[in-house]
Image (cartoon, grey):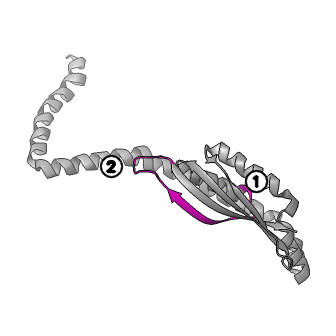
């Protein structure tokens, strides 16, 4: 007896019988059924190639977040919580004002904004600066108007980096203009307030 025939011949015979039946069944589906079958196959491929791997990444990130939360909670001792509760009103107010950068550090923060703009590929031009310093206030406000040009992702990344790097800064107004619909470059006018401790 030829064992090679048994190993390769029998599956080939079944395949030769199965293919015409499969073609006939697919032909019975019609156009809507074929589209549905195609969508089902495409979603199955997408699920197994994209969604399942992302679930493992998400699970790892959740485990990492739990680990970091445990580390943070273990670092905070009960004595730390008690000392923060015992802070008087004047001490808390002073701690609040100490958070803000000194008034003489404004050139550093302007340079930092220019550096972040260059990093993201945003063009800054003809900026306006004005220091608002009222005598009875503990904080001074450094108002900046920054005309910028760049693509939407570049402008958005610049604003996100600026708010992260300069926590005492607030964006008070944004005006966006595009020359025409096909242009990728935006002209943006950012009004920024930097709060400084006197």
Please tell me whether residue 4 is drawn above or below residue 149 in the rendered image: above
Q: Residue at x 33, y 49 (%)?
A: 43
Q: Is residue 37 left or right of residue 197?
A: left
Extreme residue toward the top, this view: 2
Please tell me whether residue 123 is drawn above or below residue 137 in the rendered image: above
Front one among 161 and 140: 140
**From where the camera sits, is residue 56 visible?**
no
Does 119 lie within the magenta span? Answer: no
Q: Which residue is mark 1?
A: 110
Extreme residue toward the bottom, this view: 89
Tell me, yes or no, whether the two marked residues, 2 and 1, touch with CB atoms within 8 Å: no
Front one among 117 and 143: 143
Please tell me whether residue 102 is drawn above or below residue 40 in the rendered image: below
Between disc 2 and disc 1, the foreground one is 1
Q: Is residue 38 left or right of residue 112?
A: left
Location of the C terminus by quadrant is: bottom right
C-alpha gap between disc 2 and disc 1 = 50 Å
- Percent x, y for residue 42? 30, 45
Does 166 lie within the magenta span? Answer: yes
* Mark 1 surroundings: few (<14), some (14-19) or many (≥20) residues within 10 A: some
Q: Which residue is mark 2?
A: 43
Magenta residues, start to end:
165-185
Q: Residue at x 14, y 40 (%)?
A: 22
Q: Is residue 39 left or right of residue 193?
A: left
Q: Is residue 104 left or right of residue 131?
A: right
Please tell me whether residue 170 is drawn above or below residue 123 in the rendered image: below
Residue 14 falls in which quadrant of the image? top left
* Mark 2 surroundings: few (<14), some (14-19) or many (≥20) residues within 10 A: few
Secondary element at image label 2: helix
Residue 101 falls in which quadrant of the image? bottom right
Q: Earlier in the sequence, mark 2 or mark 1?
A: 2
- Percent x, y for residue 72? 76, 62
């Amino acid at each position: 007896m030829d064992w090679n025939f048994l190993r390769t011949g029998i599956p080939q015979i079944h395949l030769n019988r199965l293919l015409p039946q499969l073609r006939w069944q697919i032909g019975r589906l019609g156009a809507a059924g074929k589209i549905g079958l195609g969508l089902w196959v495409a979603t199955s491929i997408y699920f197994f190639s994209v969604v399942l791997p992302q679930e493992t990444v998400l699970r790892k990130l959740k485990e990492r977040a739990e680990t970091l939360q445990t580390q943070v909670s273990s670092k905070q001792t009960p004595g730390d919580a008690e000392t923060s509760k015992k802070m008087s009103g004047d001490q808390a107010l002073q701690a609040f004002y100490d958070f803000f950068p000194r008034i003489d550090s404004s050139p550093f923060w302007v340079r930092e904004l220019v550096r972040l703009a260059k990093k993201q590929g945003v063009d800054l031009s003809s900026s306006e600066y004005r220091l608002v310093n009222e005598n009875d206030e503990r904080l001074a406000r450094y108002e900046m108007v920054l005309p910028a040009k760049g693509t939407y992702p570049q402008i958005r990344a610049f604003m996100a980096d600026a708010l992260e790097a300069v926590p005492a800064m607030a964006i008070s107004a944004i005006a966006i203009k595009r020359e025409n619909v096909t242009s990728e470059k935006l002209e943006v006018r950012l009004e920024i307030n930097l709060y400084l401790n006197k």
